[in-house]
Image (cartoon, rainbow, N blue to C red):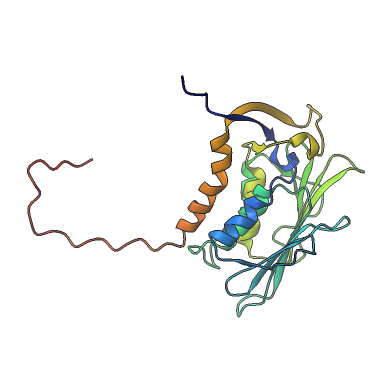
Amino acid sequence: MPPAPETVEVEFIAPRHLAGGGDPAWITIPLHRACGWSHGDDPLMPRVLLSSPGQKALLRLEPEPDGPWWTLHHTAEPDRPAWYASFGALTPVELIAAVTDALTDPAATAITPSDPYEPLQQGGWSPASADNGLVSPDGTAYVQRLGSVEEPGVTVTLGPDRPVWQARFGAHTPARLVAAFTAALADPKPVLRMDSGRSLPTCDPNVVTRRTTDVLAVYVAGALEERVLSLAARHTTPPASPSPSRQPPAKNSRSR
């Protein structure tokens, strides 16, 4: 009898904004392998620097005890001043990846209509008392000043004295990128984590739902590769359709 497929224990955690940071490779490897971003090589520094092919965007991952760990800077363009986005250490990588995926999408345009509030409102977020903001159904996440000339932001907290993470978007950040972030933030689907007990901001069952299950190891190992291939396919020009044949099809030919 062949051996049973190897499995690993994982947890599916909701709400996703309280799932912890996750694996940074979910962001960095696809940017490098699928989107052509180059990385610096400084083994003496505990940081990662990735720059876009045109050198217009720079993503920095650097441990900052009192500041954001992730910072995305973009240079000025003819139709837009320079902008930035920053994310705290415990910002789930799935949310940051939504921004970098939208930024590197070759099909997107600067005029793509986007309302950062729409996915939150559809997800049951309610108006906050100030700052033109919205608060999550569980009361732990707060989005403020979207669509204003001030710098919009997202704050996740477990109480007045228990901040979890913050995200900030410069006033000139394209709205479609902020909307990609809020759509990922409002997504009710849980996210997968391994060894989550060490990274969760809270294990309170009244706040966080944790579902532990065994998953095939090949699935876990292949998820990142599938993501890379999916993003790389966006940059691939489909082959031209072959010229129709003038010969009649064979009698035994069948269409699927």
Residue 173 higher or lower than 82, as above or below: above
Q: Quadrant of residue 137?
A: top right
Viewed as shown, does residue 181 lie left or right of 238? right
Q: Residue 234 location in percent, x, y?
A: 46, 59
Residue 233 higher or lower than 38, as above or below: above
Which image quarter is the C terminus in?
top left
Residue 89 higher or lower than 39, as above or below: above
Residue with the most extreme front position: 1
Q: Quadrant of residue 191?
A: top right
Q: Is residue 12 visible to the viewer in this orientation of the structure? A: yes
Q: Residue 97 location in percent, x, y?
A: 63, 53
Determine the residue positioned at 67% across, 27% down: 211
Q: Is 191 in front, or is 199? A: 199
Residue with the most extreme bottom position: 78
Determine the residue positioned at 54% across, 43% down: 222
Residue 180 higher or lower than 9, as above or below: below
Q: Is residue 179 visible to the viewer in this orientation of the structure? A: no
